[in-house]
Image (cartoon, grey):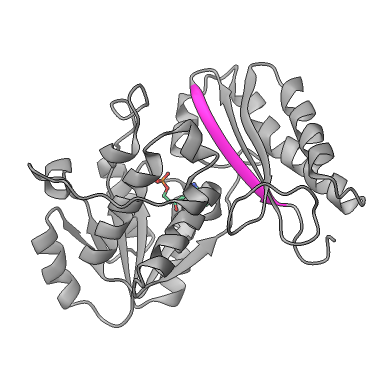
Amino acid sequence: MQVLGTIKGFRAARRDAAGPVGLVPTMGALHAGHLSLVRRARAACSTVALSIFVNPTQFGPGEDLARYPRPIERDLQLAEDAGVDLVFHPSAEEMYPPGFATFIEVGGPASRWEGEHRPGHFRGVATVVAKLLVITTPQQAFFGEKDFQQLTVVRRMAADLALPVEIIACPIVREADGLALSSRNVYLSPAERPHGAALYRALQEGRRRVAAGERQASTIRAAILAVLREAPGVRPEYVAIVEPQSLEPLERIEGPARALIAARLGSVRLIDNVSLADEGLL
Ligand code: AMP
């Protein structure tokens, strides 16, 4: 495994790489969710590239940029064990040199939900993902459904800019109680941690309602919120029932639909989502 800290160095290593390249972009603090993306990439591509970069432009003022975990030695060991070939681990100065002034603005699926609650977040995400794709030139790039809106925004950007890359969606990896794995879960105190499972429990309630024949989005949304509100310390930011490509809210579930949640638990902001209407459910 080669670890490259500069764009020039990565490009040189990339030129020597065999066959199709798969990119897994991450902010590090790797867990089994990230490693499931690496496994998907490993199965599909001859060369697997992993980027580890805590991207400052996607954090808002008052967010957790400074305290975001950066266990780089452990990450490199996990990456090597998972069969990663190339790691791109640039500094902030390498990605955003003095005078940097170009950003990608995404509308449409970026406008609501996380876009409203974290102004500027997707501008930072789209910019860094576009730059990582230009630097690494992968045939495929792997993203988790955990960040469903991010995945949708990246798909939209890749289509709109005709980027020569296939965006591959990977399922959410969860703890035994349903809490979606996240690098931020380490911020949960032992007292808070059990209540983190409320998000998935609430989403499962939404799925149950749809499976039982409920089609009115407002009723399903209310059922999800009711479960969230039962959990001590969980403060919902939004619960949305959306069409999965536009992320526009649905009034009725007649086809593909996704339920999205953001909630605070102590000092931690958690997000999660499920499909409400996958094959056989309607
Ligand atoms: P991050 O390091 O949080 O920016 O995440 C890097 C990539 O890993 C993103 O595509 C995430 O959606 C994905 N990811 C994070 N957590 C999970 C999870 N629990 N299951 C699947 N993918 C995940």
x and y percent of residue 110 in the render?
47, 48
Which residue sits furthest bottom?
19
Looking at the picture, how far across and down is residue 239, in whole percent? 67, 35
Residue furthest right as drawn: 212
Inspect the magenta stretch and tell me whether residue 81 lies in it: no
92 and 116: which one is in front?
A: 116
Tell me if residue 274 is in the magenta stretch: yes
Q: Residue at x 29, y 36 (%)?
A: 70
- Please provide the residue range marked out in magenta: 268-275
Residue at horizontal 10%, vertical 62%? 9
| Image position of 202 with respect to 193: above or below | below
Task: Answer with the quarter of the image where residue 137 lies.
Answer: bottom left
Q: In the picture shown, does residue 270 fall above or below 102?
A: above
Residue in front for this viewpoint, 175 or 265: 265
Give the residue at x 33% y 79%. Answer: 20
Q: Is residue 182 left or right of residue 259?
A: left
Q: Is residue 281 visible?
A: yes
Quadrant (top left/top right/bottom left/bottom right) for the N terminus: bottom left
Identify the residue at image location x=83%, y=60%. 281
> Of 31 and 62, which appears nearest the observer?
62
Q: Main secondary structure of the magenta part?
A: strand
